[in-house]
Amino acid sequence: MKFSKMLESYKKYLFYIYIPINIILWIYLVTGKPFIIGAQGLILVSVFIYMFFFSKKINIDKNYSLVFLFVIYCFTLTTLHFITGDLIDSYGRSLAEYHYYLYPLYIIAYIYGRNSKFEINWVSYATLAITFLLITTIANLKTFTINYDVIDSDKSGVYLALSDLFLIYLVFFISYAKNNYYRFLLFMAGCLGLIILNSRSSLYAFVIIFVIYQALYNSFRIRIVSFFTLILILFVLLGSSYFASLLESNSRMFAIFTGINDDSSKVARDYLFETGLKRTLESPVLGDYGGVIREHNNIGSYIHNIFSYWQTFGLLPFIVSIVFFIVVPLITAYKAYKDRYIFNSAIYFNLSLYIVIAVLLTKPYGWYNAWFLLGFLHTYSEQLSKSYSTVSKYK
């Protein structure tokens, strides 16, 4: 009994380490302050401790096996290319080293997702408040953007990781909240935080998830109230002089109002998609491993969506990634919606929406949080299997 309680407690620790503590530590580190361990080091140590004490409780099912096989395949592919000659980009970065660093993160993130447990309590409230307050400490509150004067220049791109983790944490809170007014407060605070963190894709995904969730998971009366509340907020926002100044000072985050097709970031992503897909189709089975360096001399110039798996690893891993990050989430979302009257089903629905939106529109194969989300979604399948076997047992 004590062992079971210890296991459940550690699952909660895993969640807090992966999401809020990870965010807090990243914010601390990007301001140039030293710490005894990095964010990635912390999650690595904690998952090893978990596996050391609770390995017998980890059920290596077909989902675990498929994830391990996928990573082994990609690792082998990288090794074969490394033997024939590693590629170095214009910044001196090794392509093999980048991938060898990434594969353990896939596995670790998946283990976290499969074994993390979230619940709303004073710890979750405290960590959310601390997270939000720390975000404001790295912000320029006049323009609602990151204040790069307080950010280490070598870590200026960390806003993408911060905004993604912050979004995921907000989705957990909103999904578990029973009070609709509380959800709206979280939504407004979340939008404010994501605007500050300067990740447009995270902000837009968050808004889409919230709107769909409100539309499908509430009664007709609450849907109407929510709809008119959002419209009212939007009109007040658009009509304010403060919003006009924000458009001028932070036009990137509000490009949807000013013309997103002319946005430099979107133009660059479209170009990378066209060139990457063209090269990939010249070798559709094997893909275009290293093509980003040959074409652009930059490891980061891959396709910024799920097609990057095809571009980098070839057709077979691309098909598997579609199953992992589109087919499985869509099936999970459908099952969760059918079970929408069960309290905790909303989190699986909302996270499924997020992962599909993210991989289709903006997130490439380097987005290892996708594996955390996949692991968490697989826990829903595990729960359903257990409930079905219990029902069959007593028939």
Image (cartoon, rainbow, N blue to C red):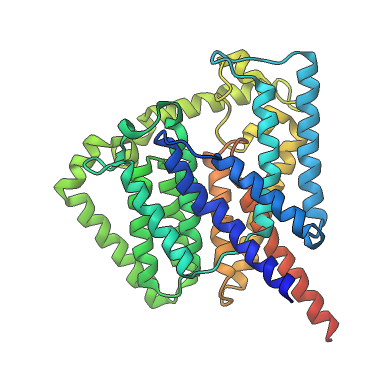
Q: Quadrant of the N terminus?
A: bottom right
Q: Nearer the viewer, residue 312 or 375?
A: 375
Is residue 174 visible from the viewing direction of this image? no
Give the tally of numbered discs.
Answer: 0
Relative side of 59 to 126, left or right: right
Residue 229, image quadrant: bottom left
Identify the residue at horizontal 55%, vertical 25% (top origin): 300
Measured along the vertical axis of the image, is residue 168 above or below residue 280?
Answer: below
Residue lying furthest left:
241
Residue 310, how many percent across, how many down? Answer: 69, 32
Relative side of 54 to 236, left or right: right
Is residue 324 visible from the viewing direction of this image? yes
Identify the residue at horizontal 49%, vertical 39% (top origin): 35
Q: Nearer the viewer, residue 393 or 27?
A: 27
Measured along the vertical axis of the image, is residue 99 above or below residue 226?
Answer: above
Residue 378, how many percent across, how many down? Answer: 70, 58
Identify the residue at horizontal 76%, vertical 46% (top origin): 67
Residue 303, how many percent across, how many down? Answer: 57, 29
Residue lying furthest front:
36
Residue 148, image quadrant: top left
Q: Quadrant of the C terminus?
A: bottom right
Residue 342, how many percent across, how many down? Answer: 59, 76
Q: Nearer the viewer, residue 366 or 33?
A: 33
